[in-house]
Image: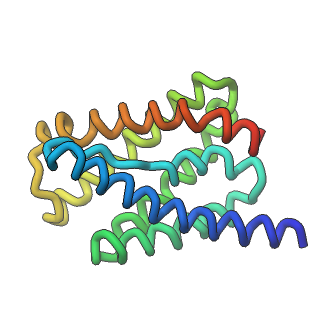
Amino acid sequence: MKILRESFFTTLFLFLIFFIDGQLSRGFVDLFAEKWHPASHILLFFTVFLFLNFSKEYIFFLFFTLGLFYDVYYLHVIGLFTFILPLLTVVIYHFLSVFLLNRWTRVLAIITIVFFFEMISFVSASLLHLASLTFPDFIIYALVPTLVFNALLFLLLQPLFEKVYL
């Protein structure tokens, strides 16, 4: 019963984070007068820690569902994030023992996860003609601000994650 309750609240919380990520991202785009496009990826922070309490099958299914919601809510095209989020969970599971070594490896892991998420997303969106940025513009105006923002945000939130999950 405890696992069921924890999985229900975790799922609900992740869907809440899904919407908070979108609002934070939009708020920062508005703050920087649409020149810089930092995207919040708090949802990806949780993937590293969720494997400590839940099975890889449950997390894979959860992120498949979140990817489907992400596609419908933000892109209106099903398939892009439905593929990317579960793929990242498989990669994270594979390298989990390295990611959890210490604080700095977790920070580097988050930067790496966000980097791959953004790169795969941009390349896929470009191939599907969903992106209007050129690759250099993407690097300068979206990728670098996103990596800096998420690294700083994770450094602020890491003590909370450690207290709850470790």
* Rendered location of residue 79, percent (x, y): 36, 72
* Rendered location of residue 161, percent (x, y): 67, 41
Rendering quarter of residue 74: bottom left
Residue 130, compared with residue 24, is above or below; it is below
Residue 7 as seen in the image, left or right of residue 42 = right
Residue that appears at 69% across and 26% down: 101
Please count the marks in the image.
0
Q: Quadrant of the N terminus?
A: bottom right
Residue that appears at 65% across and 39% down: 96
Residue that appears at 33% across and 53% down: 25
Residue 106, compared with residue 146, is above or below; it is above
Color style of the picture: rainbow
Viewer-side residue, 24 vs 50: 24
Residue 10, compared with residue 119, is above or below; it is below
Q: Quadrant of the C terminus?
A: top right
Viewer-side residue, 43 vs 24: 24
Residue that appears at 54% across and 30% down: 155
* Rendered location of residue 61, percent (x, y): 60, 69
Residue 71 as seen in the image, left or right of residue 2 = left
* Rendered location of residue 60, percent (x, y): 60, 63
Residue lying furthest front in this view?
31
Rendering quarter of residue 67: bottom left
